[in-house]
């Protein structure tokens, strides 16, 4: 839970669950996040082995982020938390 506890962490994992994304694409996917915060989350997730960072040899060079095997294992857990949240929310109505 400590891994998922940071602000925006689950959002980053969720958006990468669809496949590799570049930094700019993630910024478009999550408009409220600042570039500084997104960069910090990606670095933290990379350090923990959840995200893989690959430099793409384009001109100019760009960076692509993807979930590692460990990162992909987190997606079902996030889905389960979302389902429980929806059920709890529906009970409060």
Image (cartoon, helix red, strand yellow):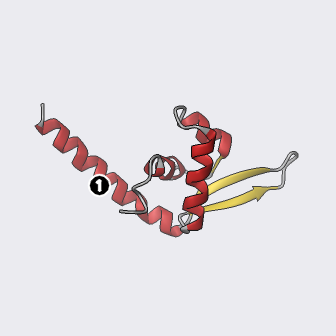
Point out residue 7 in the picture as x, y percentages from the top left corner: 44, 47
Query: How many marks do you count on the picture?
Result: 1
Question: Which residue was labeled with disc 1?
Answer: 80
Counting from the top left corner in percent of width and height, residue 80 is at: 29, 55
Q: Quadrant of the C terminus?
A: top left
Most foreground residue, 22 or 32 = 32
Q: Relative to the observer, which residue lies in front, 48 or 91?
A: 48
Please rate how many residues cluster around mark 1, counting C-alpha atoms within 10 Å: few if below 14, some from 14 to 19, many from 20. few
| Residue that appears at 63% across and 40% down | 35
The N terminus lies in which quarter of the figure? bottom left
Give the secondary structure at mark 1.
helix
For image coordinates 67% across by 60% down, the residue present is: 53
- Pick whichever, 70 or 48, lies toward us: 48
- Residue at x-position 83% and y-position 55%: 57
Residue 46: x and y in percent read 59, 63
**Residue 91: percent from left, percent from top:** 11, 38
Relative placement, left or right, of 48 versus 39 is left
Q: Nearer the viewer, residue 49 or 75?
A: 49
């Amino acid at each position: 839970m400590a891994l998922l506890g940071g602000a925006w962490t689950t959002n980053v994992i969720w958006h990468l669950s669809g496949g590799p994304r570049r930094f700019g694409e993630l910024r478009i996917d999550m408009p409220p996040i600042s570039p500084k915060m997104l960069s910090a989350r990606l670095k933290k997730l990379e350090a923990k082995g959840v995200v893989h960072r690959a430099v793409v040899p384009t001109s100019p060079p760009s960076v692509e982020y993807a979930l590692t095997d460990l990162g992909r294992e987190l997606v079902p857990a996030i889905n389960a938390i979302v389902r429980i949240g929806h059920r709890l929310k529906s009970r409060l109505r």
